[in-house]
Image: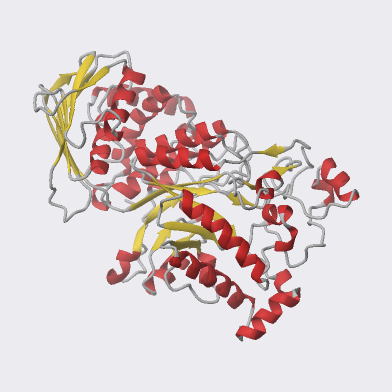
Amino acid sequence: MRLLLWLTALLSFVFVNAQEINIIPKPLETKAGKGSYTLKNKLTLANYFSDKADNALTVYLTDYLKKYYNIEVELIPKTEKADIVLFPIRMPTGGALAYKLSVTEKGIRINANFDESAFHGIQTLIQLLPVNSTAAKQIPVVEIFDRARFDYRGMHLDVGRHYAPVAFIKKYIDYLALHKLNTFHWHLTEDQGWRMEIKKYPLLTEVGSKRNGTIIGRYPGKGNDNKPHEGYYTQEEIKEVVAYAKSRFIEVVPEIEMPGHSSAAIAAYPWLSCFPNRTTAIPINMVSMKTVQEAQNGRVKFVQETWGVFDDVFCAGKDTTFTFLENVLDEVIALFPSKYVHIGGDECPKTHWKQCPACQKRMKDLQLKDEHELQSYFVQRIEKYLNSKGKILIGWDEILEGGLAPNAQVMSWRGEAGGIAAAKENHYVIMTPGSHVYFDHKQAANEDSVTIGGFTTIQKVYSYEPVPKELPESQTKFVRGAQANVWTEYMNNTSKIEYMIFPRMAALSEVLWSSKENRSWDDFEKRLLVQFKRYDLLKVNYSRAYFDPKSTVEVKK
């Protein structure tokens, strides 16, 4: 059976490669013509958006064609006679981003209403190029008009559990650009590591970015590997990443976790805890030898070495906690131009708050009925501070508990209920349900490496509809879009990250870009086979689980 499937797939490759237009995500309108345009080894480019050589559109297209096809591109003064013309023009979209790509036998033209939509047109042009860089450099005659369905099209990456170097972060951003995704949600702090330099609090990285070991195998683990893990991003590196993302028209949304998932910060500054003198709770059979030795020598707080949810969280009763967080956020805001700051807000146990005299006094003074309302107070206090700095708070759906902050936006991860509830209160929401867009789940029925569990095939990702049926038509406008989340407990190298996100990112991109009426699994599947070849060209380590006959789910048409 499996051999038959592989043979069928190979025959499919032959078939789809004979077709000329296989673009993911699928454009809104495509009109194929007759003939083709042959790209010369040296092309001229007229960029009416900017005649500067360092313009993002010019640099990206020039570098891509040189790197993968050895084609030289010369930027020339604005003229319609250039081989490739990028031209600003109004679109019949009421101001929404849109582009029109026209390929004739004489050349290529991209009309767009903004430079960002012109960049989307460039990504479509790239997907018209042959997937074999040594093949004849011809692209089909075609006219394409295109725009995105959702304004928020995101990918998340957790670097707290496992640090990823700057070079890979840039590559990750390039992957988003290829798939016309526009938001990179950078999860920078966790129980297992603080990854961002904060100059006012140097111990956050001197101490909080380092853990002494990591559990072996799937939680609860089979012991500790006793291998130190560390890494963080300097502020200069963060500026570099943000600038790189901007050149790909991708917004970077930082996440600084609070009030939970804060063990690494507390390890650096124990006074942030309700109980600074309580030793960090790590199961004794899962703790590293170095941590045991340091504890014997008097150290109390440690960066977590196992996964899960922990009782030691930021103290909500101390004003010093909020002073610390406001100072941290000041440095975050200075580095990230995005109008959004994600503060987490998920999985915050109330065990210590219930025992903490300062937290209980805060509750009594404010007449809060329970610790859920204390968390709401915490989130709303942080939101007021962010709003005063011109920023909008985003949090996981737990921020609904105890009352939603007035201007907050919600990421709904525990299914869609949180997103539906927030949208019904006229709050903007981003759908991230674990059922369909958690890319830390395995992709194959026969798991070939350790994952967190779950089973989410590319077919299941493709079947996702971000706008819940339960929402009244009048409130569907509050669904900004969706994103996939990549939690890295079991991704200790960048090759594994690639393996987990590909090819599922392709399905996500079409869910978020293409119109609902324009989507079909059967059609997508044919284009996906060509996309695999493009991944080969880019040297992407993608999963082959698609070819596993067990790795299928029923897709609702």
Look at 61% across and 41% down and name the residue there: 232
Residue 535, image x, y percentages: 41, 28
The percent coordinates of residue 314 (x first, y second) are 66, 64
Q: How was this image coloured?
A: secondary structure
Q: Based on the displayed image, in which of its 4 quarters is residue 478 positioned?
A: bottom left
Q: Is residue 50 above or below residue 317?
A: above
Observer-nearest of 173 and 307: 173
Q: Residue, x 29% and y 24% (percent of image)?
A: 62
| Furthest residue toward right | 296
User: In terms of depth relative to the viewer, which is nearer, 321 or 343?
Assistant: 321
Furthest-front residue in view? 200
Examine the image and state in which quarter residue 256 appears: bottom right
* Count of labels in the image: 0
Residue 172 appears left or right of 108: right
Of residue 545 and residue 407, the one placed in the foreground of this image is 407
Residue at the spot 31% in from the left edge and 65% down from the top edge: 476
